[in-house]
Image (cartoon, grey):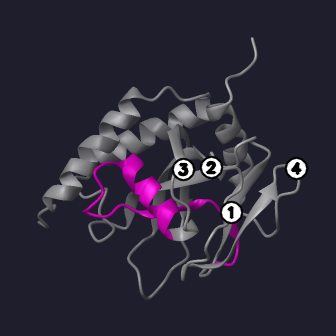
Amino acid sequence: MTTVPAPYARLHEDATSLLEGWTAPNAPQDSLRREFLAVLAAEPRAMWRHGTGVHLTASCLVLDADRSQVLLTLHAKIGIWLPFGGHVEPEDRSVRGAAARETREESGLVGLELGDLVDLDRHALPASQYSACAEHLDLRFVAVDPAGRSAPVVSDESEDVRWWPLDRLPAPIGEDVERLVRAGIAGVIPPRP
């Protein structure tokens, strides 16, 4: 049996605690929350990309200061517009921290106001001879750029990084991004009574 490196064991505890304390906004999201917790309970290597083909990842939706635009990346490997995110790394102190790091690395933006967990997504990955990853269980956070719409930097993981009006999202786009945008807006702007 593979020993789980200590940083991933700590991240496993953090993800479990985060999901146990999260109130899902609807029944489908609560079902995913329970699925993620079941994977964590059954698999101590669930945070480690080299531990198992199904593992948890962290991502972040970035909104501008007035919440009218979203920053997305045109993913270099799969050629669609997505939020920022990826695998947790041993230096990450938390899943939330992993989302912040991934966003910083992929967008070049610093000083974002990282908010709460707003959405979960489970998606299969295309088969690759370079990776054992088969499925990601993604914990998604929201962040706001307090400077407005800072100029992003395109990383080597992206073809492009660009701000988009919420009512004119780009194509091709991840099938779940519109749902994530709605969840992100709801996560940073309290609903009206």
On screen, residue 71 versus residue 10, left or right, reads right
Q: Nearer the viewer, residue 175 or 58?
A: 58
In the image, the segment drawn in magenta is: 78-105
Q: Is residue 134 visible?
A: yes
Disc on the earlier residue, 1 or 3? 1
Residue occupying image coordinates x 54% and y 69%: 106
Foreground mark, 1 or 3, reads 3
Residue occupying image coordinates x 65% and y 50%: 147
Q: Are marks 2 and 4 in contact (CB under 8 Å)?
A: no
| Residue type highlighted by circle 4 | Asp
Residue on which the image places disc 4: 167
Residue on which the image places disc 1: 72
| Residue type highlighted by circle 3 | Leu
Q: CA distance from mark 4 to mark 3?
A: 22 Å
Q: CA distance from mark 2 to mark 4?
A: 19 Å
Foreground mark, 2 or 4, reads 2
Label 1's element?
Answer: strand
